[in-house]
Amino acid sequence: MSDDSPEVFESVSHENRTFPPDATFAEHARIASMEAYEAEYRRSLADPEAYWAEVAENLKWYRRWDRVLNEEEKPFFKWFEGAQTNLAANCLDRNLENGNRNKAALLWEGEPGDDRVLTYFDLYREVNRCANALRQLGIGKGDRVALYLPMIPELAIATLACARIGAIHTVIFAGFSANSIRDRVLDCEARCVITSDGGWRRGQVLGLKDIVDEALDGVESVSEVVVVQRGRPEPFPCTMREGRDHWYHEIVRSQPIHCEPERLDAEDMLFLLYTSGTTGKPKGIIHTQAGYMVYAYQTTKYIFDLQPEDVYWCTADIGWITGHTYILYGPLLNGATAVMYEGAPNAPDNGRFWDIVQKYGVSIFYTAPTAIRAFMKWGDHWPNGYDLSTLRLLGTVGEPINPEAWMWYHEVIGKSRCPIVDTWWQTETGGVLISPLPGATPTKPGSATRPFFGVDAAILNEEGGEERAGILAIRKPWPGILRGIYGDPQRFKDTYWCKWGGAYYFPGDGARIDEDSYVWILGRVDDVVNVSGHRIGTAELESVFIENTKVAESAVIGVPHEIKGQGLVAFVTLKEGVEATDELNRELREMVASDIGKFALPERILFSSDLPKTRSGKIMRRLLRDIAEGKELGNVTTLADPSIVEELQQKYWAK
Ligand code: PRX
């Protein structure tokens, strides 16, 4: 942690309420007591290779592994070396063989109220037709395919189709701007982009194909664009470019319903998912076949205590890692029935999520603290107006949950009966690393509790000594760990493996551990901000501002936000003679929207004559955070220009 990073030690929570698992729930749970958890946890750490090999036995392999874990080229770990498999075949063919052929795999709900049920056989057929169509376009193993789609069944289908033919998918959240798509497509040299004419968002149509056209202007690697027609019966207005663009329904229609899955090596790339780091350039996180599959399978099974009759709903978007692992792969690997919803929680009104729970009889519901806080604000009468009695388990992910929101979730949604799993993990970890097991772990509001099987977590100081509060570190590799950053092995080593001499994985989060060995995540210790669960690097915004010729310098910080968890505040200094106007403020906001996406818009942009710096010229972001939080600032005389602090305080707090 640099002296400029957020002060994790101060925000130690004093929450000490404990909620034992509901007895009825525990009666049928896979892991039904803390003793059972402890015993299995000890076993998994004593011999992780034996543990993960045993888990892998549940899945389908064309060739078995020669070795479970190879650490020789650490941190480039190899799991299940020598094995061959196919993730899509494990999600689909394996379920046809397991008696789930006619079971619902996806219960899809469109924002305007249209719906569609896909059984495992339906999904198998659709994925295979799409996979055959992609092969016919010349797409195959190792090719990168970017997906920019709303949450419609074709997003799940096309993602699985890529996995089936060994193409590497990179899903780009449909809230990203054209520039963000372009950066990602260029970085991975995608050959194909799959998009749609448009998508629904709060009753409006978003023209996705137009955004893709703008993004691909001048991009040479992309030879094929496949367009799903979401507009029914007529497509939403968009233009199709001769020779490059294909309507999805036209190329898929006459394809055979079987498609031989590609036999992929355990460490072949499965997908890239771009995420923000501490520099202006997002990182293409690499996940590979076998380890990711085994980890997604096992975490979904135990953390959500999946039972055959469950209706499971994760409200994330497939554009983020949560959607990859816990909408798509984890549930399908377990033969679950998963709900997928296209739209916003407040379309057409604030009761939409509860209406969906009631309509489908959702039993497991997994969402983010930011959504929970919005529901709290909208009022209890919304959930109370629906029948939520089918719910048996609740989950949260993406950011620390404040105890008040946890209690509301527990009482108003869970009727004090449903366990809550607060799951801590990251794009890089592939699946959940720290979480309660719902039938076993007594929960405490705001704590992610204990590590999952095979996960060896520690809280360390800068030097690597164990602490009660400090930086979260993971000692042993687990199968779902990222295998690299696309095209940048050095950045991979520097970002995750440099601290503590390569002995631990460094996730970038602060945490504390309590007397029951429960982990409390305290937020990021680097310059990454979590806005409504979306990870945004402050450097990304700063590099947008600096592109404006009127801007001399900027510093962006995260500040507490009632609903979003954190919001962004930008401090901007202008070049000599440039005036700070509302118009310039608007101009900068538009730049953020078009360079990144609207979700990254700052709450405020403050113009100032300078920024607080050390004498060596380093911007003191920490001081800016203290100003924004109204804290006592202490001694600022070591700054290059101490008077700037007063100016900033006045401006920040001026009404
Ligand atoms: O800071 C942690 C926070 O989200 C970060 C990871 O963001 P991302 O890669 O976008 O993945 C989000 C979904 C897995 C983490 O470094 N975070 C995630 N889950 C929690 C959390 N913070 C506290 N509690 C959580 N349950």
Image: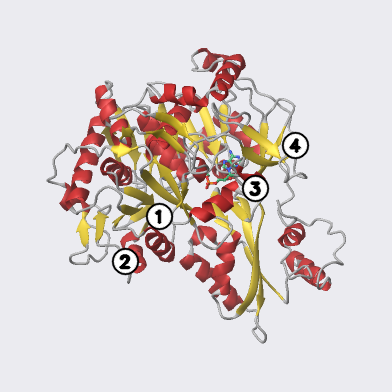
Q: Residue furthest top?
A: 27
| 565 lies above or below 304 | below
**Structural crowding at the residue carrying mark 2, measured as other residues with C-alpha within 10 Å and reported as few (<14), some (14–19) or many (≥20):** some
Query: Whole-percent x and y of residue 441?
Result: 61, 22
Could you tell me how far apart the alpha carbons at marks 1 and 3 are, in whole angstroms?
34 Å
Q: Amino acid at mark 2?
A: Asp
Closer to the chain start, of discs 1 and 2, is 1
What residue is shown with label 4?
467
Which amino acid lies under the numbered mark 4 shown in the image of this protein? Glu
Q: In the rendered structure, which amino acid carries the disc numbered 1?
A: Ala
Contact (Cβ within 8 Å) of mark 1 with mark 3: no
Residue at the spot x=24%, y=66% of the render? 239
| Residue under label 1 | 174
**C-alpha gap between disc 3 and disc 4:** 16 Å
Residue 578 seen in this snapshot: yes
Query: Residue furthest toward the front?
Result: 72
Foreground residue, 118 or 527?
A: 527
In three-dimensional space, the C-alpha distance between marks 3 and 2, rounded to whole angstroms, equals: 42 Å
Q: Earlier in the sequence, mark 2 or mark 4?
A: 2
> Residue at coordinates 30% horizontally, 52% vertically from top-left?
143
Q: Is residue 144 above or below residue 24?
A: below
Q: Which mark is residue 213?
A: 2
Question: x, y percentage for residue 385?
Answer: 50, 34
Q: Which residue is mark 3?
A: 499
Q: Earlier in the sequence, mark 3 or mark 4?
A: 4
- Please identify the quarter of the rendering in which residue 181 is found: bottom left
Tell whether circle 2 marks a residue whose Cβ is less than 8 angstroms from ligand 1.
Answer: no
**Tag in front: 4 or 1:** 4
